[in-house]
Image (spheres, coloured by chain):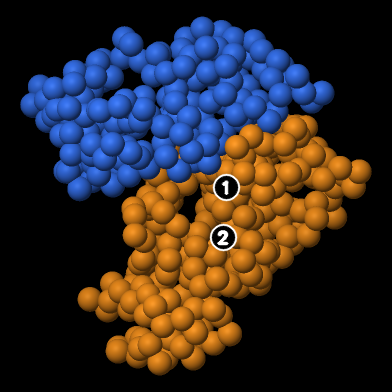
Chain colours: A orange, B blue
Amino acid sequence: MKAVDFDYAQPATLDAALELLSREDVMVRPVAGSQSLGPMLNLRLAQPELLVDITRIAELRTIRREGDRLVIGACVTHARLEDGDYPDVTRGVLPSVAAVIAYRAVRNRGTIGGSLAHADPAADWVNVLTALGADVVIAGTGGRRSVPMTDFILGVFETALQPGEIVAEIHVPALSDRARWGYYKVCRKTGEFSHATGAVLIDPARGVQRCVAGATSGKPVVIDGPALFAGGCTEAAMAAHLAGSPAADDPIALRTHTVALKRAIAQVMS
Amino acid sequence: MSAHAKTISLTVNGTRVEASVPPRQHLGDFLRERELLTGTHLGCEHGVCGACTILIDGEPARSCITFAVACDGRSVTTVEGLDDDPVAAELREAFSTEHGLQCGFCTPGMLVAARDVVLRRPDADNPAIRTAMSGNLCRCTGYVGIVNAIRRVIDARNTNAG
């Protein structure tokens, strides 16, 4: 239960961090709150030679409003999003979801960018930011690029990040004042990783009717359009949407995913 | 000692500490083995059980998945550092009164997490206390006593405040 002997750097600027992360002579990994990577290091599932701690980079810890978007730095903690010291453009999505991530002791250190980069299919932000239509701004030595959530998460623990790149910002679009959202996780124990996640957003002003089935052992499954609302969220419909994922062939998983999404939908229809 | 050892400077229970640490050493091991503060208990060592919960800059954190090297410049408080803390004192008495511990292994982490609940959630009902404490496991399964102890402290503080 002890990590391998790794080297560690704590750069103060993004440029310095990116330079370290572009090193090819050692196996290097970025780390923020270490709430996912920490366990992997202790279990030796991850054995890097150099960890680059990006939490001291001031620009990655800011939250700002930019027109109709909220720009959240990668190293903003879940606890800060829970406590809400920022203009919440999401009608409560960000603080409500942050509050149900793991436990407060984990939320105090774990970060939104770290959670996305880790890309556990059951992670809250992976699914919720997909439902919200957020974009991820990725920084590398070659500059920055913006990737929509639907193209950022590629699979289980798999993202669009290339070697040497890190998540710098998350851009969350403001919801209109008629927007409604729902979120439901199936967990046997409070705070554990979800077995099935349903995330739903209806925003008539922006023409959004979106369901997301998460924790499917793959990338979030996005179902746009009105089909699943008003009674359409059946096991048969879900089997079609989940086709190709292990969840579709397992009757218990299929039912669990159907229930999670149904309950999230019920929250917006009530 | 690791070839990668780094010098860190932090405050542990109010005392300035300078130390050379291998980056791989987590904060729990640093506190127990170098500072000999064995009140912090290590259970699962992968962030699940909550026994190792301590305070970093006043906020609860898992010392087993936080590396000591990452705490340079921070202030760390362990259960030993809560001797004179008024909330911790009330909790110790309430844990005793309500039988909030049996073997005591989870208790240091429980006290640190419970202190956070008392301070941050003075409006918590019992289900909210259970949810807020769900990151701390008691393998004696003495949860009823633990929840009652926290209930007692919150109620007493609310009565005194009112």
Considering the numbered disc 1 on the image, is that residue within a helix, a strand or a loop? loop
Q: Residue at x 66, y 13 (%)?
A: B19
The label number, if any, that marks residue B151 in the structure image: none
Q: Where residue A98 sits in the image (x, y, percent)?
A: 42, 52
Q: Residue at x 31, y 9 (%)?
A: B84
Output the chain of dot 2: A
Q: Is residue A20 above or below residue A225?
A: above
Q: Where residue A1 sits in the image (x, y, percent)?
A: 60, 37
Pointer 2 and pointer 1: residues touching (CB < 8 Å)?
Answer: yes
The label number, if any, that marks residue A36 in the structure image: 1
Q: CA distance from mark 2 to mark 1?
A: 9 Å
- Indicate which disc, 2 or 1, sits on the residue closer to the N terminus: 1
Q: Is residue B12 above or below residue A97?
A: above
**Which residue occupies the foreground of this view, A34 or A266?**
A34
Q: Amino acid at mark 1?
A: Ser
Q: Which residue is mark 2?
A: A120
Res A64 seen here: yes
Q: Residue at x 40, y 14 (%)?
A: B80
In the picture, the quarter occupied by the N terminus of chain B is top right
